[in-house]
Image (spheres, rainbow, N blue to C red):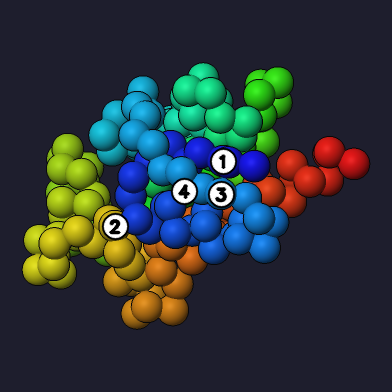
Amino acid sequence: MIVAIGSKNPAKVQAVESVVETLNWQVEGIKVPSQVSAQPFSDAETRKGAVNRAKACVDSGFELGIGLEGGVVDTPDGLFLCNWGALVTEAQITYVASGAKILLPKEISEPVRSGIELGDVMAEYTNKRDVRTQEGAIGVFTDGWITRGEMFAHIVRLLVGQYQYYQE
């Protein structure tokens, strides 16, 4: 089976590949719109972006589509990272899962709240290009203990597990 991931982002594509390799599924990353803000700012918006990406994959002719979306959630305790994933089947059955959340430091959350994308803030903060395609903010703020790819792989495991359970 060929499953599409609604992104060309290497961290997301590799996350899916690492999970489904034992299933003999082939993975193809395709560029599709999330139809949400460039910087999703709630669980609901981030989840919607993941679902939209997964549906767009199926609409492009794939048997299964996976969408992964990162965002932020503003809470009384501060701004947290949030991450959502969705798996959509040809029959339009949708499975969703969420990942880890961590509090962002004020020097990161303040520019994000002012409208700058987290990836851009992280690039300036770390003086590295493409943090969003590598370790991600979660990798930076966990000192590499959890990378963006690992976090998304966890979400993909939750999605594939649900899909397999309900196929029985």
Distance CA(mark 2)–CA(mark 4): 14 Å
Identify the image quadrant of the N terminus.
Answer: top right
Instruction: Check disc 2 and report its element: helix, strand or loop.
Output: helix
Distance CA(mark 2)–CA(mark 3): 21 Å
Instruction: Check disc 1 and report its element: helix, strand or loop.
Output: strand
Q: Which residue bears the numbered disc 4? A: 83
Q: Which residue bears the numbered disc 2? A: 133
Count of labels in the image: 4
Which quadrant of the view contains residue 113?
A: top left
Of labels 3 and 4, earlier in sequence is 3
Q: What residue type is labelled 1?
A: Val
Q: Which mark is on residue 17?
A: none
- Few, some or many residues within 10 Å of mark 3 (<14, 14–19, 20+): few
**Labelled pair 1, 2 in contact (Cβ < 8 Å):** no
Distance CA(mark 4)–CA(mark 1): 20 Å
**Labelled pair 1, 3 in contact (Cβ < 8 Å):** yes
Of labels 1 and 2, earlier in sequence is 1
Q: Nearer the viewer, residue 154 or 76?
A: 154
Q: Give the side of residue 41 with respect to residue 1, left or right.
A: left
Q: Which residue bears the numbered disc 3? A: 26
